Amino acid sequence: MDKNKADKLDQYTDKICKDNLVPLWNVLGKLVTPEPKSPCQPTLWKYSTVRPVLLEAGSLLTAKEAERRVLILENPGMPGESKITTSLYAGIQLIMPGEIAPAHKHSQAAFRFILEGDGAYTAVGGEKSYMSKGDLILTPSGRWHDHGNESDQPTFWLDGLDIPLVQFLDASFMEHHSEDEHPHVIEDGDSVARYGSGLMPVDFKASSPTSPVIKYPYSRTREILDKMKKTDEWDPCHGLKLMYVNPVDGKSALPTMGAFMQLLPKGFTTSTYRSTDATVYSVVEGTGKTKIGDEVFEWEPNDTFVVPSWHHHQHFTDGECVLFSYSDRPVQQALGLWREDRGNR
Ligand code: GTQ
């Protein structure tokens, strides 16, 4: 373009900006990209780094003072934004013996994936779900929840929330309960007993798109993977991979976050894979490494790492490994946006 013409267009752009108008031709390439282009960076958080500093926070303030004693796993590609991916949040929460993290409710949905400890609980709507390593406990949007620790050990878990997604949609509401603990009006473990065994009350009407099962115990998850291992073929990209589902409709247990658990055999290398849902992994069992683009991340139990959208990646296992993961896949699928690429580079 000649200089005269370019100057005229610049003057034009300056002139219209006071009317809150912007020429699309200046920004189209940045807005509508040929492929996902994310500020999210592949990153690993070692549990051996997080645990001691979180315990230190345990001596600096109580769970009640903090409301939630959590260290956010913040993606270095989005500093100050409290995001692990562009749409999702992750944090590691600590509750000390005898503490209570007071009851509140919010639009944001959450899950707890238990890393360490036995006998702490999350109460949802007054129903306590006791925690053991590898359990997944849901906190659906808009439900009262408090956490407590009746054991004599500090308890650590990974918090996954859809905070950035709700923020993007400007749909956040939050309330504190008048008491620290919501009255324990429902028997402990009621939801698993009622809805977690392949039976549903006749004419059951779901009041929300979230699974009525609050807790998915690791003992059961691990048993399924062990059974599958005896008869099923390993998928080249995923090994054996399960999705946590809502038994009412077979869809994702939470409408905004898909959660998964996969088993990879000893000495396995997965085929190169990528998908549009940036994925957060929490290592449950085993050691290995993951190549994301050209970077290699070595992991061990309770480490967390993130694979950004549309980044080629491969897992390499030492021994048999179990990986938990979550992403915004159900949102992308509901909108017809989700894509995967199982091909090799
Ligand atoms: O436990 O309710 O990591 O409200 C961030 C926000 C945990 C919680 C987080 C929360 C919670």
Image (spheres, rainbow, N blue to C red):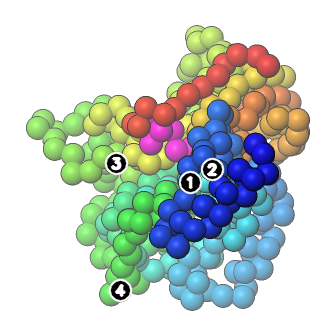
Is mark 2 in CB contact (under 8 Å) with mark 1? Answer: yes
Query: Which residue shows up at 27% across the image and 45% down it?
Result: 194
- Left or right of 50 on screen, residue 251: left
Label 4: which residue?
Answer: 179
- Secondary structure at numbered mark 4: loop
Query: Which residue shows up at 48% across the image and 34% down it?
Result: 337
Magenta stretch: includes residue 120: no
The answer for how far apart the CA atoms under marks 1 and 4 are is 54 Å
The answer for how far apart the CA atoms under marks 2 and 1 are is 7 Å
Label 3: which residue?
Answer: 210
- Which dot marks residue 23? 1
**Nearer-the-camera pick, 171 or 158:** 171
- N-terminal label among 1 and 4: 1
Up the image or down, 12 lies above or below 278; here it is: below
Q: Residue 258, how many percent across, how many down?
A: 50, 41
**Nearer-the-camera pick, 342 or 257:** 342
